[in-house]
Image (cartoon, rainbow, N blue to C red):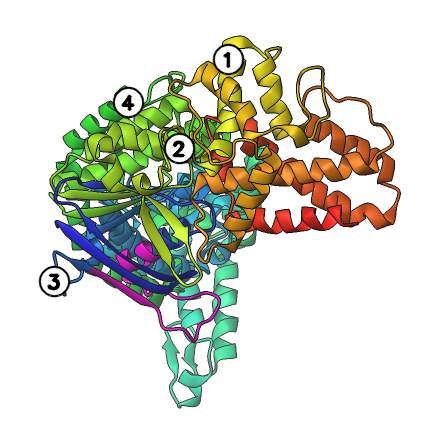
Amino acid sequence: MNKLKIELQHCYGIKKLNHEFDFSDCKTFVIYAPNGVMKTSFAKTLKNIAKGEKPCDQIDDTLTSVYNLFIDDSENQIQPEEICVIEPYNKKAFDSEDKVLTLLADDETRKEYLAIFNEIESLKKSSLSGLKKISGSSNYESEIIEAFSNLDKKNIFEIFEAILNDIGTSKDSFEFKYNDVFDKSGKVKIFLADNFALLKEYIEKYNDLISKSTFFAKNADHVFGTTEAKILGKSLEGDEYFTAGHKLVLKSHGDVSAKNKLAEIIDEEIAKVFDDKDLKDLFKKIDTLLDANKELQAFKKVIERDNSILLRLNDYDVFRREVWFSFLKQIETGIKSLVELYNQKKVDLEKIIQKAKDSQSQWESTIKEFENRFVNNPFTLGIQNKADAVLNEETPAIDFKFQGKDIERNNLIENILSQGEKRAFYILNVIFEIKSRQLQNKKTLFIIDDIADSFDYKNKYAIVEYLNDLSKEDNFCSIILTHNFDFFRTLQSRILQDNKWEYSFVAEKLKDEIKLIKAGSRNVTDPFTSWKAGINNNEKHLIACVPFVRNLIDFKDGRDNECYKLLTHALHRKTLDGTIKATADIAIADLQVPFSSVLSSIAFTFTDTNKKIVDVIEEQIVAIKGAENSDSIVLEDKIVLAVGIRLKAEEYMWSKISDQTVISGSQTGKLFQRYKNEFKQDKAHSEIIKTLESVNIMTPENIHLNSFMYEPILDMGIDELKNLHDKVCGLTSN
């Protein structure tokens, strides 16, 4: 892609933006956009397009949004997958699913994995929703995996698939809580092993009783005991079998044609077995042993309710699996659906995981690159194999260490890292995304939205260097957005270099559209060169340079210098101070000596050098306010307005306060405090105080504290200053 023509209308507050980006000679454009102009809206629009979604106007949904991104002088639009929006750091960057593989090849693949994972997890949750209540298990998934470890399956889905038939044929029914018999600590199993002889004797006595019974039977090939009798009774507990005219013929009881009669016979025959004195004595011995162990009281209650359970515990692990068959039988339909979905998605998951494995070496190099660029982080990173959340297959994942100790990722992010460290970690995720596109040779337009915002200078410059390297990639083009003017200038000098005037822009919000103005066309990033050239005969440039020259004198000669004092009088309402003229009396000619003391080739050629500075300022403000189209990025206009506002405000306050003693240092703030102290109880002055507070907030930094770093005044809308000037002028008439 050599050219990108963007046409946007009604996209998240952008009424209109038409611009062509020519990447032929430089792969990176930088745009400075003051807050509220277009930066976030632009990034959000492009993110929508990247996701295949439609941007819109959030205020008026009746408006039709236009979002064309034409490439290379054609009607062909850039493909969504060719757009990657990198947003500023935010906490949501870490709100991803904990179980998703860290090293999946790219964001698209991660999303694909997450979609499959969420689909399977959602069905698993709904299919197994009743299992906790049915089983009474505290963690049924891990309990099932443990119970069926003999199958050597990778995960619970494969286990379900392997036991589906056993689930379907299960006829058992148990009412005890799973962990009462199959406790996590294994105490029941230990007890049974320790008392194996007694349990064996009990079972042998039981078998002897049923073998002698006329109702029960036991031989080498077949057993019909108390458990089987219970299953028979349960299967016929409904009336349907007998009301249909069927009957059972029992060897010991003849014809049975009613369910109640059958239940009565089964209960009597079971009682005969378990009421046997010898069997009861053996059970009492077991029960007495259980009494001595408080940890086995739940198990004791279970076998007291149903003595027959002891018979099945002869093979603890087999019985455990049979219990699960009975529980799972109750949700058999859901398990079948879950197994079916898993088999459908398994191949796709395996491909994704193999992709992660194939790119492991590249991820290792990416981590190394991150650690080299972003130094002094308290955490270190490595690659280790971890079990995938669905397939349970070993896959490469990020291993985190904090000060040499292994740390789980979410714990690291939520509880350990500082905000600065979290930002560094966020950059790692960004590098992963960019790296994946490099590996795939994927042509990409990066929209980079204030990626360095809120970072310290050390890491900010590391980001700049990384972006510089990115600008040299043949398959990549970038549009970097920022509202940080200092960062904007850094990008100009370090990335754009000789191309900085052609490839850097300032976004200007007009009434009906956004315009991208070349940074060099308004001397935005180097205004002083232009102002200096016009000092001799341009009144606006002269006023704009007053704070600049005053700062130079301060650095060179200090604040006791008479030239410094004179320029201070030009910026503040002051009376005659020895030889230093009052503000109202300072003329253009008076500025030549101070200017010449720090700037060369100063020879004023103004038509009228006797014109008072206060009059020059007022005339220039009238011209600025009367201009048909105000240019919000012309710095000299804003400085002239700021100076004029402050002079008017100070004039008003001096005219009202009682304390007329001279103020030294930070006059505007101290003068405002005097005014507020005197009039704050007067309700008639409440609105005036608000206006003066605005003056105190908006003008000082713009005039002198930031003469060399003038971002505050650049960010401020010129209309704000015009309106404030109107308000202050209104005060002077009161």
Residue 235 is at least partly visible in this image: yes
Tell me residue 270's x, y (percent). 48, 61
Q: Secondary structure at mark 3?
A: loop
Question: Quick check: 325 above or below 567?
Answer: below
Per the image, the residue denoted by label 2 is 534
> Mark 4 Cα within 10 Å, few/some/many (few <14, many 20+)?
some
Amino acid type, residue under disc 2 in the picture: Gly
**CA distance for labels 1 and 3:** 56 Å
Q: Secondary structure at mark 1?
A: helix
Find out whether the residues at labels 1 and 4 contact each other: C-beta distance under 8 Å. no
**CA distance for labels 2 and 4:** 44 Å
Amino acid type, residue under disc 3 in the picture: Ser
Name the side, left or right, on which 74 lies relative to 589: left
Which mark is first along the chain, 3 or 1?
3
Q: Nearer the viewer, mark 1 or mark 2?
A: 2
Residue 205 is at least partly visible in this image: no
Find out whether the residues at labels 2 and 4 contact each other: C-beta distance under 8 Å. no
Q: Which mark is residue 248?
A: none
Q: Nearer the viewer, mark 1 or mark 3?
A: 1
Find out whether the residues at labels 1 and 2 contact each other: C-beta distance under 8 Å. no
Residue at 57 percent across and 16 percent down: it is 563
Per the image, the residue denoted by label 4 is 373
Q: Is residue 99 magenta?
A: no
Which mark is first along the chain, 2 or 3?
3
**CA distance for labels 1 and 4:** 36 Å
Per the image, the residue denoted by label 3 is 74
The residue segment tinted magenta is 45-69
> Mark 3 Cα within 10 Å, few/some/many (few <14, many 20+)?
few
**CA distance for labels 3 and 2:** 44 Å
Which mark is first along the chain, 4 or 2?
4
Task: Examine the residues drawn in magenta and state their main secondary structure.
Answer: loop
Q: Secondary structure at mark 4?
A: helix
